[in-house]
Amino acid sequence: MIQELTLFTNSYEETLEAGRQLAKLSAAGDVLLFFGDLGAGKTTLIKGIISALQNISPDEVVSPTFVYLQIYGHAPNAVYHFDLYRLTSPEEFISLGFEEFLRKEALVCIEWPERIAPLFPDNVWRIIVNHLGEDKRSIKVIRP
Ligand code: ADP
Ligand code: MG
């Protein structure tokens, strides 16, 4: 059964809090795909998730734009944070040895998942972030 909900936030802080709430709903083994334009708030949501799960400051979560992957914590409480903005192809993802990271006992959060669309596992979460203007954002969460 697909479950769907849409949240609206009016500040960076509210989006962090939405991420903290998402952290409570998800578990190791889940793959969360974050869709949305640059500046929409994908990284902010993931900062909320990771800071809640790893008990660190949101400021310690920085998007891995140049290295593609940042790992927080240890199995079974690990979080893998991918930012695939600069990835050129799904083949590059495979050749870097990342494919197996999609099926581990970790919570997997992926920004710019469009880059690896052919590799999506079954039962992914889709989180669509939209910039509605100024500091207002919509966050649509589609749970598998
Ligand atoms: P993305 O990862 O989607 O490119 P970021 O989360 O890195 O986006 O950046 C979002 C930017 O928008 C930040 O500079 C943040 O301060 C600002 N911002 C303003 N309002 C919000 C909001 N409601 N939610 C999230 N970010 C917001
Ligand atoms: Mg980002």
Image (cartoon, grey):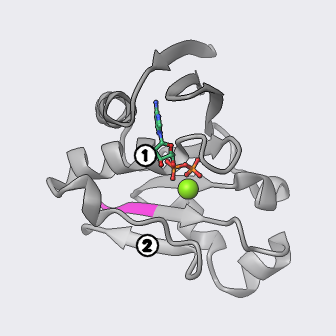
Pointer 1: what residue? 44
- Residue shown at 51% from the left, 73% from the top: 69
Q: Position of residue 41 (x, y in %)?
A: 53, 42
Q: Nearer the viewer, residue 56 or 100?
A: 56
Q: Is mark 1 within 8 Å of ligand 1?
A: yes
Question: Residue most toward the front?
Answer: 134
Q: Is mark 2 within 8 Å of ligand 2?
A: no
Q: Which mark is residue 89?
A: none
> Which secondary structure type mostly characterizes the magenta part of the structure?
loop
- Residue shown at 60% from the left, 40% from the top: 40
SS at mark 2 in the image: strand
Pointer 2: what residue? 70
SS at mark 1 in the image: helix
Q: Are marks 2 and 1 in contact (CB under 8 Å)?
A: no
- Residue shown at 61% from the left, 54% from the top: 111
Q: Amino acid at mark 2?
A: Gln
Q: Nearer the viewer, residue 55 or 57?
A: 57
Quadrant of residue 124 in the image?
top right
Instruction: Give neighbour class at mark 1: few <14, some 14-19, many 20+ (Cα, 10 Å).
Output: many
Q: Report the side of 44 relative to 23 (left or right).
A: right
**Callout in the foreground (2, 1):** 1
Say whether residue 79 is magenta.
Answer: yes
Whether residue 76 is visible here, answered yes or no, is: no
Say whether residue 71 is magenta.
Answer: no
Placement of 52 over or under 130, stated as above or below:
below
Q: Amino acid at mark 1?
A: Thr
Extent of the magenta region = 76-80
- Residue shown at 49% from the left, 16% from the top: 8
Placement of 46 over or under 137, stated as above or below:
below
Whether residue 123 is visible here, answered yes or no, is: yes
Q: Quadrant of the N terminus?
A: top right
